[in-house]
Amino acid sequence: MHKPNLLIIDDEISICKSLSFILEDEYQVYTSVDPDEAVALFAHLSFAIVLLDLRIGMRDGIEVLRTIKQLSPKTVVIMMTAYGSIASAVEAMKLGAFYYVQKPIDMEELKVLSGRAQEQYHLQSRVEWLDGEIRKAYDVHGLIGESDRMKHVFTLIDKVKNIDSGVLILGESGTGKELVARAVHFAGERREQVFSTINCAAIPANLMESELFGYEKGAFTGANVRKAGIFETADGGTLFLDEIGELDIGLQSKLLRVLQEKTVTPIGGHKEKRIDVRIIAATNRDLKKEVQQGKFREDLYYRLNVIPIQVPPLRERKQDIPLLIRHFMDKIGGKMSKQIKGISQEAINLLNDYPFPGNVRELQNIIERSIALADGEHLTIRDMPMDLQPQRGQTADGRLVPVYVGDTALEAERKLILATLRELGGNRRKTAEMLDIGERTLRDKMSKYKEEGAFP
């Protein structure tokens, strides 16, 4: 069984040796009489426990404790000293020391204490692991969500990951259709192979054919070397055809042939090349309507649309907004090297009330902009873009409370009550009079909103 690592830092070699002798049966023991040398060990090793002297020569053990906690927050530190004082004990505990013992050390007591410290270390590791598992449960290859709509998407991803039937991902712009395609690929058996993407709306029709199928040397003026198409380079992997509804109708028939025959012929070539490529397509168009209007081939539509995956717009999965905010704050704050610890409830309410026409991509942009401009460690409503700010509840002189299609009657009521209360400076009596409801009714509703986190 692997022994946990334990580090002893003390300027007396005799103490290092005696403690090491006592503890070596239960731990892989390391010793150091030099604090700098001891701290350097953290670059290569993980320590469950550190026994740290409060005074190491002329060095203050409290400063060493602070450094250790910065390098390895999970490491459990037990302070040792012959210069015990209440003040130093309190300071050590505030900095995260697990316990404080005085010399001469009672060895039996130390064994018991180190056992408890080991339990504490394992508990912290377990909590960290569980937090990671929770995040993974709500984060499938970059897809964040715990709403029923997103759980359904995750279920479909799991079901189709290892089959080669056509998958058509449907959804508005910014909903994360490419993330769904990547999740299908990287969750499945082709994960070790290439994942290629081509945006059918970004490449002119006269260039798209060569991008898809490649060309032979001399196929046309300027074709000085052979160029492999994306079907060939994606062989064995997955090809994601984004915005498939934009593909030229003439190329649609050639794409259909590739899907049926599993072969591709470069422009100017005569020899077919067999390919094994999984096709995933996506669109924000209504392809069924496009088929009826003659803008999209019906046979290609049915070839691609064997398994449709509908990615919901953000306004239909409001439950996921707090998770997405947390994800983007962690991700973007880290890149910007800004310590953003949280976001105010008022700012969350503002984002919850916004319809997000740009979906998840727009939310990410809003959080990025807010973090870039924020002065404090918490995002507030002042950090949100001005064009996001709704005109709030002054019913007396014409201001509006935003209510959107899809809001429930209870949500609309909550918005009106909170907006009116804010406008009247928190005066509940005046709010009840303006809304023509009883003060007790208002008080009960406010208590409910507070329990739901909708009111600070």
Image (spheres, rainbow, N blue to C red):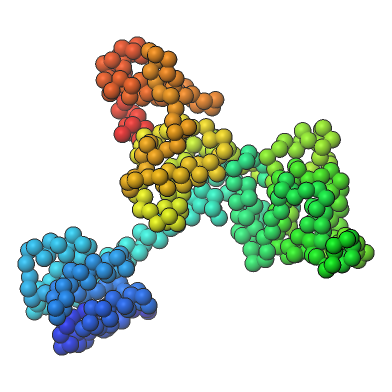
**How far across and down, in percent of the image, does residue 399 sit?**
42, 18
Whether residue 26 is visible here, answered yes or no, is no
Whether residue 414 is visible here, answered yes or no, is yes
x 73%, y 62%: residue: 234
Relative to the observer, which residue lies in front, 306 or 26? 306
Question: Considering only vertical position in the picture, is 182 above or below 421?
Answer: below
x 37%, y 36%: residue: 382
- Name the residue at the right extreme: 270
x 16%, y 65%: residue: 92
- Name the residue at the front extreme: 222
Please give left or right for residue 332 compared with residue 32 in the image.
right
Numbered marks: total:
0
Question: Considering only vertical position in the picture, is 402 above or below 380?
Answer: above
Q: Which quadrant does the N terminus fall into?
A: bottom left
Please give left or right for residue 207 compared with residue 425 in the image.
right
Question: Considering only vertical position in the picture, is 97 above or below 445?
Answer: below
Q: Quadrant of residue 68?
A: bottom left
